[in-house]
Amino acid sequence: MECTVTWTGATGARSAMGFVAETGSGHVVAMDGAPDEARPENGGANLAARPMEMLLAGAGGCTAYDIVLMLKRGRHDVRGCSVKLTAERAEKEPKVFTKIHLHFTVTGKGVPAAAVERAIALSHEKYCSATIMLSKTAEVTTGYELVEA
């Protein structure tokens, strides 16, 4: 797996801290920093997601993928899955995530709660590389709601 991240600020972009990541699979993602009013040359222009937001989004995508895949493999009629992630970071550098809560909303027809609970547990204990890695610095908790389609 590879990724190339290039600073866009060097080419006269509006943001002093803008970056573009090109993934090994050929996709492009923009990132930017928050504006710094005290030192504009050190801040971004809020033109894209922050790198730490991208990390959090990646963890959500990784675990949601697992959940949908496991429910489908179990032949459950899953019709939707979303996960809202909320996180807290350390006060001082490095400002690692210290708490992450993932709240899943699974929509389906006749999907048993036990199947959703098992899929979430397996994702966080065995399959989701991202949340397992983040759990080394953060307390990761989960919750869910099941919506009948």
Image: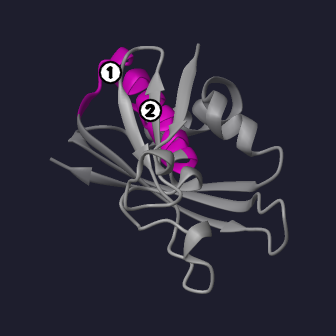
Q: Classify 54 as above or below 91.
A: above
Reading the image, the residue beneath label 2 is 67
In the rendered image, which quarter is residue 88 located in? bottom right
Location of residue 121 in the rendering, given as x and y in whole percent from the top left corner: 61, 37
> Is 83 placed left or right of 81 in the picture?
right
> In percent of the image, x 82 and y 51: which residue is there?
137
Reading the image, the residue beneath label 1 is 72
Location of residue 42 in the rendering, given as x and y in whole percent from the top left corner: 62, 68
Quarter holding the N terminus is top right
> Hey, what amino acid is under mark 2?
Ile
Question: Disc 1 versus disc 2: distance between alpha carbons?
Answer: 9 Å
> Is 23 placed left or right of 125 in the picture?
left
Q: Does the stretch in magenta take in 105?
A: no
Instruction: Write the start and end of the magenta stretch as one range.
Output: 55-78
Location of residue 131 in the rendering, given as x and y in whole percent from the top left corner: 65, 40
- Name the N-terminal-most of marks 1 and 2: 2
Mark 2 surroundings: few (<14), some (14-19) or many (≥20) residues within 10 A: many
> Hey, what amino acid is under mark 1?
Lys
Mark 1 surroundings: few (<14), some (14-19) or many (≥20) residues within 10 A: few
Residue extending farthest bottom: 38
Q: Nearer the viewer, residue 35 or 79?
A: 35
**Magenta residues: mostly which secondary structure?**
helix
> In percent of the image, x 26 and y 53: which residue is there?
147
Which dot marks residue 21? none
In the rendered image, which quarter is residue 97 located in? bottom right
In the rendered image, which quarter is residue 115 located in? top left
Element under disc 2: helix
